[in-house]
Image (cartoon, grey):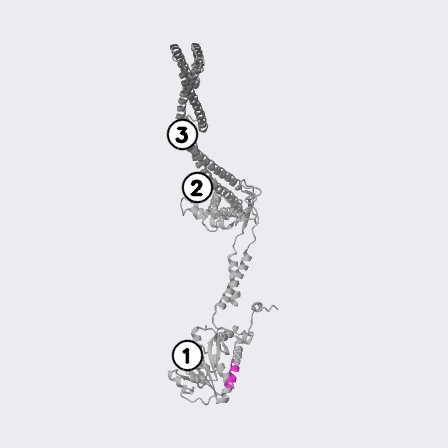
Amino acid sequence: MNWLILVPVICAATVFMLTRKSKKEYSSSTTLYTGVASGYSITSTEDERLDYFAVNNAFDNMLASAKSRETIAQVALHLLAEHLSLRKPDVKVLSPDGFENLHKMAGKALLNTAAKLRTPQAIYNYINQVYAAKQGNVIAYILNQPGSYYNIDDLKSNLVVTRISTSDIIQIVYGCTDAAVCQRVLQIHIEIFLANYKRLKTDQTNSAVQYFEAKLAEAKAKLKKSEDDMRIFGQQNHIINYYEQTRYIAEENEQLNREIYGQKIAKTGADNALALVKNKLSTRDKQIANGTSIINLRQQLSDANTALERAKVFGNTEKISQITARTRILEDSIKSASADYDNLNYSLETIPRTSLIKEWVDNAVSSGNAKAGLNVLNNQKRDYLKNFDEFAPLGSTLKRLERQIDINEKEFLSILHGLNLARLRQSNIALNSNIVVQDAPFLPLKAQKSTRALLVMLSFVVGFILVGSVIIGRELMDSSIRTPDRAKKLINLPLAGISIATNSSKPKTYVQALRHLLAEQFISGLLPALNEAVTAHGTAQITLLQTKTGLFNAEDIKLTDGMLSQLFDSVHWVIPSGKQAAFATALPQGKYSIYEPAIAHLNYIDVAQLVDTTLSAYKLIIYVAPNPAQHSLPAAIVKNSAVNLLMVNANDTWLPVDKDLLIKLKTMLAGANLCTWLVNADENNLDSIIGEVPKERSWLRKKIKKVITLNLR
């Protein structure tokens, strides 16, 4: 219990002494509006549901960026550069103590260089280059010096960045022993954090935009090349509109086929009619001459009609007019010759000869016209077939070119859509990364309340809890027998008596009274069995069994012998060799006999045989049996005892080997009166036997015990 008070007091006193020279702490803060959750977004709509997971993720990224080592290192370098530019202490920038500590850490070389550079920006560029160039330089030493304003780890631990509840605002708090440094660290941190965060956000989309721009340029070049190939193909093959041209050619070809068919019908009919008329006409000389003339004229007319059709095909207006005029002249000449022929005579069927001649001429003219038209149309047919041969293979090539243009155009439009989305995302990120300072860092004019008293109280409580935990842990982990209740539970034998341990270094006034009380209870428990044996046999025997050494206490032996001697006139102890030291101190010389344990004792039935003398003069014999773990136990002698006491040390652990020995004893002493004598017990563990131990206790211990026992009065 003394340790329960002493250790907490020592802890509190130690903390009190260590915090005597602690410096005052100042704290400054700032708030930033981010607009992550409720701010306007280009890519979102008013009805869009808020994604809380995305918002929390954005804030986590923001807080991680604010406390990243790179950001803190830049803050430390900028702060160091500003302080190195000072020529003398300035409480608005750096206190005299901080100025002096900086000069001690920096060294003359760095201070001289800073004096030459003068401006904070120039000094920052220099120390940043030195810090990044190699390890082990003076800048790295300053930035890792514990307790300095420029220590990166201290800056990171003292800089607290949190989100205020579920709002769009983050709060940054920094505390140190210099008020000016508190404010300036936050100002520098805001500048660097906002710049780094904006750069990180824009870098996310810059690479995507650059990727889409490069792919768009490639797709545009491919599309232009495919379109140029299409244009060159059309120029080389004289194609304006392939599908319209082919449709026109197909329609004209159908029309031409119909005209050819009509000309063939007309020619066949004219030839048949002409042959019939020839058979009807006579063959006189005049008729022959006249017919020859008409034939010549007809031939000329046929040639003229052929030339006229050609001219119509080629669209030569002047030539058409000339041939048309000649045709009319020839037709007039034929008509004149026909009239002459009609005057010669009539046909055999009494048809005027002129009618036959006229019919013959008409048929001849029709046949000639049909033949001439058929020749022209056949020539035109060959031209159309030639066009078909030229246009047929062009269709597949043109389709392939159009398909390639369509593929390239779709690829171009898809990449263009991706580029537009990336640029929209870039603009949205730029809009959302525009963090605004809501509350600027302020200069703390009042130091924070000292936590010294709290630390002292906390150290006392921690010390108290620590000692209490150790005490409770020892109790919970202690597997020794300790209490009478545990002895009954573990050994499973009746508990005959208890004796307490002797502490000669710290004698207590109440111990002797407690020892006498326990001894009286012990003897009272044994007395009925002993009186019964004395009445029956005139003498009684007690056997003390032991499984371990160090169980006999001189005070217990002396006190037990004294009380038994008062009850029985004569008491004698029979002890094995090796135990006489404890008994020689407690008993007179004639009060005990010593024997040497031997295997021959197994056949003995009386304890007197062990010492080769008669013990009939004694009413009570106390036989101390040898340790059964080391020597043989004479069972017959033990069974003659009125009471057999198994001595158990309260500080020992009841092991499996002890259990085995007890089982053997029970088997060997079946039917005998076997009990337990608990020795070396702690006085504090006897409440269940004798109630509260009558000793002086402190006020605190009394109160603690009342709380533990739920006695709240």
Q: Secondary structure at mark 3?
A: helix
Q: Secondary structure at mark 1?
A: loop
State the CA–CA distance, disc 3 to disc 1.
Answer: 123 Å
Considering only order in the chain, which callout, 1 or 3, is on the residue closer to the N terminus? 3
Residue 562 pos. (x, y %): 50, 83
Quadrant in the picture for the C terminus? bottom right
Q: Which residues are magenta?
A: 522-531
User: What residue type is disc 1 on?
Assistant: Pro
Kindly identify which numbered label has been placed on residue 126. Answer: 2
Q: Nearer the viewer, mark 3 or mark 1?
A: 3
Residue 33 pos. (x, y %): 56, 44
- As drawn, 593 above or below 340: below
Q: Which residue is mark 3?
A: 392
Q: Residues within 10 Å of mark 1 (few under 14, many from 20)?
A: some
Q: Residues within 10 Å of mark 3 (few under 14, many from 20)?
A: few
Residue 294 pos. (x, y %): 41, 12
In this view of the protein, can residue 286 be seen by the observer?
A: yes
State the CA–CA distance, disc 2 to disc 1.
Answer: 88 Å
Considering only order in the chain, which callout, 3 or 2, is on the residue closer to the N terminus? 2
Q: Residues within 10 Å of mark 2 (few under 14, many from 20)?
A: some
* Residue nearest the observer in this picture, 582 or 688: 688
Please indicate whether residue 104 sits to the left or right of residue 436 in the image: left
- As drawn, 657 above or below 149: below
Residue 21 magenta-highlighted: no
Callouts 2 and 1 close, C-beta under 8 Å: no
Residue 524 magenta-highlighted: yes
User: What residue type is disc 3 on?
Assistant: Ala
Q: How many tags in the picture?
A: 3
User: What residue type is disc 2 on?
Assistant: Tyr
Q: Which residue is mark 1?
A: 628
In this view of the protein, can residue 501 be seen by the observer?
A: no
- As drawn, 358 above or below 459: above
